[in-house]
Amino acid sequence: MENNNFKFEDEEKSSSKNKIILGIFVVVVLILAVLLFLHKSPKMNDAFNSEDAINRINPVKDPKITYFNYGGEEKPNMAKFGMVRRGGTRPHQGVDIFAKPGTDVFAVLDGKIVDLYADKNGYGLNLYLEVNPNDLEKLKRSDYKPKESFGEKLFGTNYNFMAKPKYIRYAHMSKVFVKLGDTVKAGQVIGKTGVTGNANKARDPHLHFEVAFEMRGKGLMNRVCPLMYFKIKTEDEMTKQDIQVQREASKVEWTENKGYEIGYRTQSVFAAEDEKLRLEEEAKKKKLKEATKIPEKTSKKVVKK
């Protein structure tokens, strides 16, 4: 009887072991099936960067800086943020992302359109998207290092480390599908790229893209480098094929779509406020100058008797 009991116990142990092995096998198969499904399933939209641990939405699909400049010369550094123009004497407030006219432009985060106008001599058809600064901070990168020897910077001289950027600017667009005051969702197509404004007749068709914590300011003031937040391929990360695509595009003089400005305001919604601030600043300077002006010595006239 004792031998039979041992036999039953061995059979029970063997049965339990087989169940455990079968259970592990089923779990492994399920995990592999889920991974295969996720790999083959379509992306949420073309702007999603699947290589990131963070689910970033890019302004255009597979973004790369412009390898060539306005005149078709190989000068990728001029597409970066910083003092990168005219031998380091002229600032560039954002990054230029290569895109042939008509390329879809995406909202990178949920937000609201707070400015939208056609600047024929500058930004062309452009808009500002106001986002939740905390949402933007979640995208912040620590791995991007600017080439300071080429004038690249991470932020303007007045950058406030306590302030959080909350404005995204898109410029030189050919079309927009939103209106001033609209709210948009991350990944929504908000327009098409173009070469409007001072990008007309360029050999580097691109989307000018800015990140700022205040909407106004000359030079690099109030701006930060978009590469601090978005993974946009730089010249060091591009393949030979990437560069060749841009080289072919640089052989064409891309012209803006006629009448793109019709129906849009020609100035920023903040233009009147900017002018008021400018006049107030001039008045302050004038008053200060007058207050510090040394009065001229008056000579006494000799009266002859």
Image: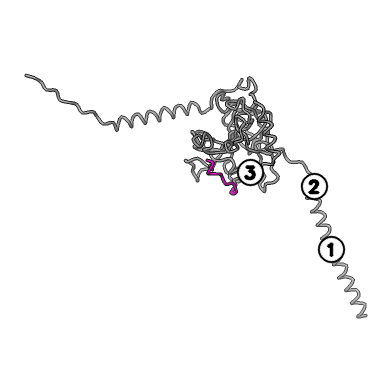
Q: Is residue 11 left or right of residue 242?
A: right
Relative to the observer, which residue lies in front, 281 or 66? 66
Figure quadrant of the N terminus: bottom right
Look at the numbered disc 3 and give the secondary structure of its residue: loop
Check if residue 147 falls in the magenta segment: yes
Image disc number at residue 53 = none
Which range is magenta?
A: 141-151
Please name the residue that numbered disc 1 is placed on: 21
Looking at the image, can residue 191 be seen? no
Amino acid marked by disc 3: Asp
How far from the left and from the top, in percent, is residue 75? 59, 36
Amino acid marked by disc 2: Phe
Figure quadrant of the C terminus: top left
Mark 1 crowd level (few <14, some 14–19, many ≥20, 10 Å Cα) = few
Relative to the observer, which residue lies in front, 244 or 29? 244
Look at the numbered disc 2 and give the secondary structure of its residue: helix
Distance Cα–Cα, label 1 vs label 2: 24 Å
Front of the two marks 3 and 2: 3
How far from the left and from the top, in percent, is residue 56? 66, 43
Which comes before the other along the chain, label 1 or label 2?
Answer: 1
Please name the residue that numbered disc 2 is placed on: 37
* Prevailing secondary structure class for the magenta stretch in the rendered image: loop
Distance Cα–Cα, label 3 vs label 1: 49 Å
Above or below for 19 versus 137: below
Image disc number at residue 236 = 3
Q: Residue furthest bottom?
A: 2
